Image (tube, rainbow, N blue to C red):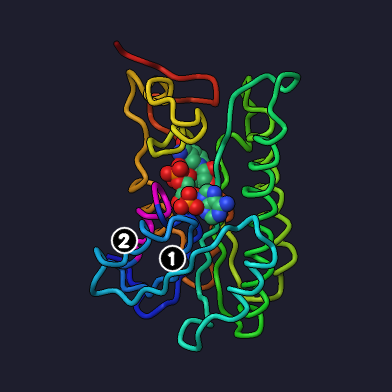
Amino acid sequence: MFSLQDQTILITGASAGIGAACARLLAQAGGRLILTARRTDRLEALAAELEQTPCHLLTLDVRDKAQVAEALGRLPAPWQTVDILINNAGLSRGMNKLQEGEVTDWDEMIDTNIKGLLYVTRAIVPGMVTRGRGHVVNLGSLAGHQTYPGGNVYCASKAAVRAISEGLKQDLLGTPIRVTSVDPGLVETDFSRVRFKGDEARAAKVYQGLTPLTAEDIAEVILYCVTRPAHMNINEILLMPTAQSGSTLVHRQY
Ligand code: NAP
């Protein structure tokens, strides 16, 4: 097992899916965790499960600029030195054609996936620069590389994450801070349930007839990225299930 002994790791969207899987795996690797999301009850359950791991829980809506600045600017003393930031909180809403899209869905995706990620990064990275130590991992997506029909604004939000990761890497040149974008294809989590607003049947269809990636697969990739030697930066990892070869190319067996 790679070691993250005593490193302080902040995960946004730790209440479910990829974020929760990262919490479990990075805890096993010895990390101390700042777990953030809106659903506090889920964070509490996760922290109880990780009983041997020091955890600090923060109820945080990454869309709320003032809340992010306040909560992350006033972390309790033992939690102020974040070594690894995992910008994972994100979602898709709807799959309408753009000309038929719901403006509130667009706002939610842009406010969470782009602006929320920026607010959290802005609050945490200056401390990393001052301390001369840190790693930012952004959850991008295959959707940020290839737009698919109905994906319009979600894909745009993940293309923005890709540009932000590239820009942050450039802006941190000359510091030891590392930046990685992890860009998965189909991962079975609550993602499609959220996208289709609780329509379980429609969500299940997304993964039917193929073996999707799991949240644990993505956590393993992230653990790999954050345990490389200090001179090595994994800029971007694009990964997908074997049964997928592009945003719209999926092989299903029924
Ligand atoms: P998920 O199971 O639905 O988890 C999403 C997480 O984001 C939840 O913990 C949720 O927590 C949090 N979140 C959403 N809005 C938030 C907000 N405003 N403030 C704070 N936290 C918020 O989905 P997932 O698949 O693990 O998604 C994690 C990331 O991976 C996302 O950025 C997603 O775009 C990306 N991704 C997923 C896939 C996939 O196929 N699943 C593929 C590529 C990329 P609360 O609701 O408790 O706040």
Depth order, front residue of 3/95? 95
The mark found on residue 35 in the picture is 1
Please state the horizontal and vertical placement of residue 114, each as a whole percent of the image: 68, 50
Q: Amino acid at mark 2?
A: Leu
Q: Quadrant of residue 213?
A: top left
Can you identify the residue that label 2 sits on?
46
Disc 1 packing (10 Å; few <14; some 14–19; many ≥20):
many
Judged from the image, the secondary structure of the residue bearing numbered disc 2 is helix
Q: Which residues are magenta?
A: 16-26
Q: Quadrant of residue 201?
A: top left
Q: Amino acid at mark 1?
A: Leu
Depth order, front residue of 238/57? 57
Judged from the image, the secondary structure of the residue bearing numbered disc 1 is strand
Of the numbered discs 1 and 2, the one sitting upstream in the chain is 1
Depth order, front residue of 239/32? 32
Is 77 within the magenta?
Answer: no
Please state the horizontal and vertical placement of residue 215, each as a whole percent of the image: 37, 45
Q: Is residue 117 depicted above or below 162 in this figure?
A: below
Q: Is residue 90 depicted above or below 197 in this figure?
A: below
Report the Cα–Cα distance between label 1 and label 2.
9 Å
Q: Residue 20 vs residue 113: left or right?
A: left
Disc 2 packing (10 Å; few <14; some 14–19; many ≥20):
many
Q: Quadrant of residue 224?
A: bottom left
Chief secondary structure of the magenta span? helix
Depth order, front residue of 26/94? 94
Q: Are marks 1 and 2 in contact (CB under 8 Å)?
A: yes
Q: Residue at x 29, y 11 (%)?
A: 254
Q: In the rendered image, is residue 12 in sight?
A: yes
Please state the horizontal and vertical placement of residue 151, each as a whole percent of the image: 62, 27
